[in-house]
Image: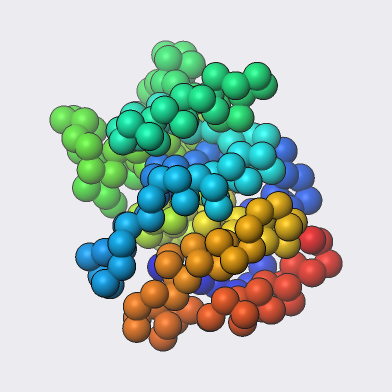
Amino acid sequence: MKVDTQMVNPAFQSILQNPDQKIFLDANFFIPPDRSEVAKVKAYSFTDFKECWLIPLLSEFSGLVMHESVYDELVADSVKKYADEQKSSNPPKLKIHYDSELNSEENAMRNTYMNKVAIHSKYDPSIDNAKDRGEVRSLSFMAVKQFLFFAANDSLPIRLIKDAAKLGTGLDDMQIVQMYELIYYLYKRDRCDKKALRTLYKYQYYLTRGDKRINPDWGSFIKQMDALYSGIM
């Protein structure tokens, strides 16, 4: 996954200025990362991921939401239990949006968006298969309701949003927020273990030779992000 520290991300800038805005999360923001297939490393334990990432993230941002199709992907017992606890807390730290919120006209619009988006993915709406289901159905719901921000660490939704005009997805007004940007936010806000955040960054973005060819090391990452956002943070 490419880390972009050369250009300001308007979505991230907007969230810095107003952290209470609604942000839809992809499943990989809740599911511990596992890069054991690309490097000789262990998967993150949920306990470590929760402590260094989820607890501070859910404490800092009051507008975190998921579409039901993403929520359904949280199948591991520990992950599902924690998500349910956040959903049931008072006030809720995580909210779920359902397709049942759509009226008949909005359902028709959702289906139109879904067909435009799905052709660029491995999801087939006619059989409702699992692959890419969460991203496609989330983005289609968001487009109908005109929600702006989707947070992901996956190449598919990033491409669908960034290349919306080229691909004809209809998602032209949507914006993407990436995990490394929120890692930076939490680091600068000094809300959690900075060493643990550095470890998470390195695991996600600076682990393999390929990562190191395209992404900055931790120290350079912080300096470059500071140069972009120091007037806001």
Q: Residue at x 22, y 37 (%)?
A: 130
In the image as oriented, which residue stretches furthest toward the left? Answer: 127
Quarter of the image holding residue 30? top left
Q: Residue at x 74, y 76 (%)?
A: 227
Residue in front for this viewpoint, 29 or 82: 82
The quarter of the rendered structure image containing the C terminus is: bottom right
Image height of 136 relative to 205, above or below: above
Tally the marks: 0
Position in image of residue 61 (x %, y %): 67, 40
Residue in front for this viewpoint, 203 or 13: 203
Q: Residue at x 53, y 80 (%)?
A: 217
Image height of 71 relative to 123, above or below: above
Can residue 148 be seen? Answer: no
Q: How is the image coloured?
A: rainbow
Image height of 89 relative to 201, above or below: above
Image height of 110 relative to 9, above or below: above
Q: Residue at x 44, y 75 (%)?
A: 206
Q: Is residue 159 left or right of residue 87?
A: left
Can residue 81 be seen? Answer: yes
Q: Is residue 112 left or right of residue 2?
A: left
In the image as oriented, which residue stretches furthest toward the right? Answer: 231
